[in-house]
Amino acid sequence: MALSVSKHGQLIDIENISFSFGNTKVLVDVTFSISSGDFLAIIGPNGSGKTTLIRIILGLLKPSHGKICIMGKTVGEFRDWHEIGYVPQKATHIDTLFPVSVKEVVEMGLVSSKVFPKIKKRDEEQLIMRALKYVGMQGYINQRIGNLSGGQQQRIFIARAIVNHPHILFLDEPTTGVDAEMQERFYDMLNDLNKKEGITIVLITHDIGILNKHVSQVACLNQRLVYHGTHKEFCNSGVFKEMLADGHHVITHKH
Amino acid sequence: MEAFFSYGFLQRAVVAGIFVAIACALLGVFLILRRDAMIGHGLAHVTFAGVAIGLLLHVLPLLTALAVAVLTALMIVKLKEKAGIYGDTAIAIFSSVGFALGILIISLARGFNVDLFGYLFGDILAISVSEVWLSIALAVVVVIIIIVNYHKFLFMTFDRETAKASGVKVERLDIILTILTAITVVLGMKVVGILLVSALIVIPSASGLQIASNFKYATIVSAIIAVSSVVLGLFASVYFDFPASGSIVVISFTLFLLIFAVKQLRK
């Protein structure tokens, strides 16, 4: 299927988005675009509105002002949700007593596809196995998800998010609670998804140490959009230096 | 055993009971995992008012109970959504008010206490042919809707936010699931009675969830346990002259304990 984009040639247009919880302003007049093939990191301090922005893009929250266009359509008009994968912030905070197998969790990702009822059982199995192989979890297909470690669970949620081979993958702090070694492998996997599979990645992270390694674009939020541009420009910018001066924890990665 | 199936009333009870048991079990696994196990209990209390209205107006109580239960189910969903109160609080409010209304209606029209007794404690052995067909039809509708929406119900039960972000209409499905619960409660009311109907929804499903390695297996095992409880309960009721409702619930609890014991021994 041909990739749809907006009239500006962008995958996602965020236009003048503002959002408040009661009297508390969370986002103020945020405008930027996400292009096809980007590996975008959204960074910013706690409470800067990163998760809120993602939730607005996904239609989970309604903005108090502004609009979002996904592939040229407003969130209300957009129907191709199978083109979008999402791994939420607390994905691994699951009910460990919930009797659901790895296969069933990945299969959930196919629900969003319009073609789901038409997918033959055999094709469905192949899609699930392909996604699990991608995250290196094919040997766990019949395991109960509650029996897996946090890092393994996170890989299963990635598999669920990519089982439809989406155009865009949103991840909200996906490495929280994952050990350093696993984090390296995790970011390598995201890089492969971006470079080899052509999936646009939008990653919320506090880990600004990864910016040099994989990320092509950076959006820095602090209620307003403080910065949006390439990672190279960002690393030389005053915003980055200010963040370091403010005591942002930088995690280094092997290269 | 031959004699067991030679009576028309028993055949009707078994057939209706099996269908209702399957609907209860399939719904039960979702309700338990949604932390909504008590909604069956709450709606059952509300159906008491519905039954009283039916008896007062000389309309089939199953129908009036169904109307009241569905209406209340929708009000519970709206109250949770609009008033921002916890689900169990909404259920507690409506179950108490429903039961209170039932008592008031009874006091208005004395003389049907005996009929009401059958709805409170279940009277499946006295189920009529028309009630059997109505029960089967409704149970089949419930089961078909659950099967058609199975993957969506599972997704939103397991991870509501991601399901919603994937285009699953969770609010609409909440309403559907609550209406299905109301229908199932009314069906179960005839089998085990208003006071025990939530047991038929919760206990077999809780048993299935104990031993299941995956969700599909949990629903199948729960349905098998629910059907076994109804059939064995009716068997015990006829041969030992026990009340059917009590026998069904005690047997389902016995199966729950057996599964629990086997699970503990395997550890």
Image: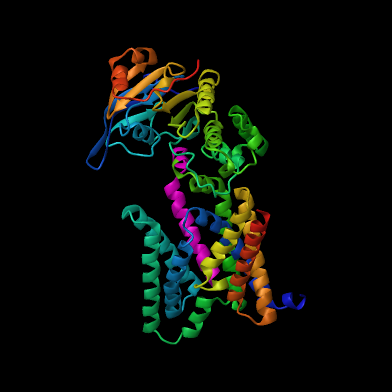
Q: Where the N terminus of chain B falls, by quadrant?
A: bottom right
- Structure colour scheme: rainbow
Is B91 left, or right, of A16 in this rendering?
right
**Furthest residue in direction bottom, as rendered:** B111
Whether residue B73 is visible to the viewer of this picture, yes or no, is: yes
Q: To which quarter of the image does residue B20 belong?
A: bottom right
Residue A89 in percent (x, y) is at 43, 36
Is A47 left, or right, of A86 in this rendering?
left
Q: To which quarter of the image does residue B222 belong?
A: bottom right
Q: Which residues are magenta?
A: B162-189
Residue A33 or residue A101, whichever sits in front:
A101
* The stretch drawn in magenta includes residue B176: yes
Q: Is residue B7 above or below residue A141?
A: below
Residue A46 or residue B53, whichever sits in front:
A46
What residue do we see at 60% from left, 49% from top? B215
Is A23 left, or right, of B135 in this rendering?
left
Residue A219 in percent (x, y) is at 35, 22
Magenta-drawn stretch, dominant element (helix, strand or loop): helix
Whether residue A7 is visible to the viewer of this picture, yes or no, is: no
